[in-house]
Image (cartoon, grey):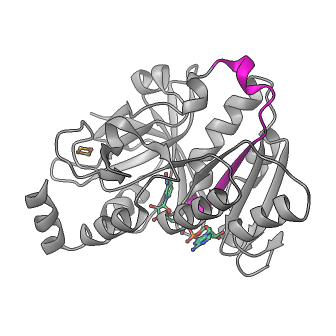
Amino acid sequence: MGNKVVSKRLLADNIYLMEIESKRVSKSAKPGQFVIVKMDEKGERIPLTIADYDKNKNTVTIVFQAVGASTKLLADLSEGDFIMDFVGPLGQPSEFIKEDISKLKNKNIIFIAGGVGAAPVYPQVKWFKENNLDVDVIIGSRNKDLLILEDEMRAVAKNLYVSTDDGSYGYDGKVTDLLKDLVQNQGKRYDHAVVIGPMIMMKFTSMLTKELEIPTIVSLNPIMVDGTGMCGACRVSLGDEIKFACVDGPEFDGHLVNFDEAMRRQAMYKSEEGRALLESED
Ligand code: NAD
Ligand code: FES
């Protein structure tokens, strides 16, 4: 029968939040992990980072943009409908969650979210808050209408900074401009950055944090097929090393990821010929 859609909310134009019933996933989910959703037998597998989970209600929250055929089908579901497959939690939990909490006490950490990337950032920031640790957060969107989870994030962040590319709300500029302003003009110091959003945003933000000498973690969302490390679809290069985002990630050192290759692969997967070519390589 599948997994029930318990609630559905439109967060911004074409961006949906859904709570899905799954006792198994909610019991073991940790911030940083993801699920793979499949709508029907022949459907595409959609990897989605876990945006929240409630072990008491047995629910897992996903946030997605309805862009392709599969995410549009998902967006068409209503409360009470069912998703055929909801597999997870997959991937490694966030690095910080595995660390000794006492070691995190004196660290200044900034989370930087671009657009829909605010969804996977939220459970991580919430985890810090639950463990009495303060972190700063930047969320950037193209304009005010596309900004999501602002209130939720404000409730868990020590300082929340918002930017819009068109200046319609908060800081006028991209997340990189805002980070530069905080560090270079407002005297902020950060020991770590966690950057999640579109690939191009993670690329440029990682270039900036390298310049600013801030160790940086990014969360990659390449195309995934099996989610088990067997098919090679989610292959990423980190320096000379090859990693698979589904089993080794999704989080990696942002200063090592070959973003240009990752973006090329993502673009190729959009066409049938490109997909066939990549599959023959793997
Ligand atoms: P977007 O294109 O609206 O960008 C969001 C923000 O990122 C911008 O407002 C800007 O501040 C920043 N940004 C974008 N390009 C930048 C650049 N070149 N330099 C510096 N900053 C830049 O984002 P969107 O439309 O919400 O993004 C959707 C994409 O995000 C989809 O491709 C989706 O797959 C991806 N996504 C990734 C994750 C993840 O886990 N990494 C999670 C959710 C969505
Ligand atoms: Fe197949 Fe990662 S999705 S190896």
Q: Quadrant of ligand 2?
A: top left
Is residue 273 shown left or right of residue 20?
left
Instruction: Report which quarter residue 122 is drawn in.
Output: top right
Looking at the picture, how far across and down is residue 225, in whole percent?
A: 23, 49
For residue 205, what is the image quadrant? bottom right
| 174 relative to 33, above or below | below
Residue in the image at 11% along x and 66% along y: 276
Q: Is residue 49 left or right of residue 172?
A: left
Residue at 42% x, 28% y: name it.
22
- Residue 103 magenta-drawn? yes
Q: Residue furthest right?
A: 186
Image quarter hosting the N terminus = top left
* Horizontal side of residue 106 vs 36, given as left or right: right
Where's residue 164, x and y in %? 73, 72
Q: Residue at x 41, y 36 (%)?
A: 4
The picture places residue 173, in percent across and down from the top left corner, at 75, 76
Along the horizontal axis of the image, is 126 left or right of 160?
left
- Looking at the picture, tell me which residue is in the foreground, 223 or 244: 244
Please tell me how many numbered marks the rendered image carries. Answer: 0
Q: Residue furthest left?
A: 280
Give the extent of the magenta segment.
100-116
Q: Position of residue 97 (x, y in %)?
A: 59, 26
* Residue at (62, 57) in percent of width and height: 210
52 is within the stretch colored magenta: no
Using the image as rendered, state which of residue 116 and residue 68 is in the foreground: 116
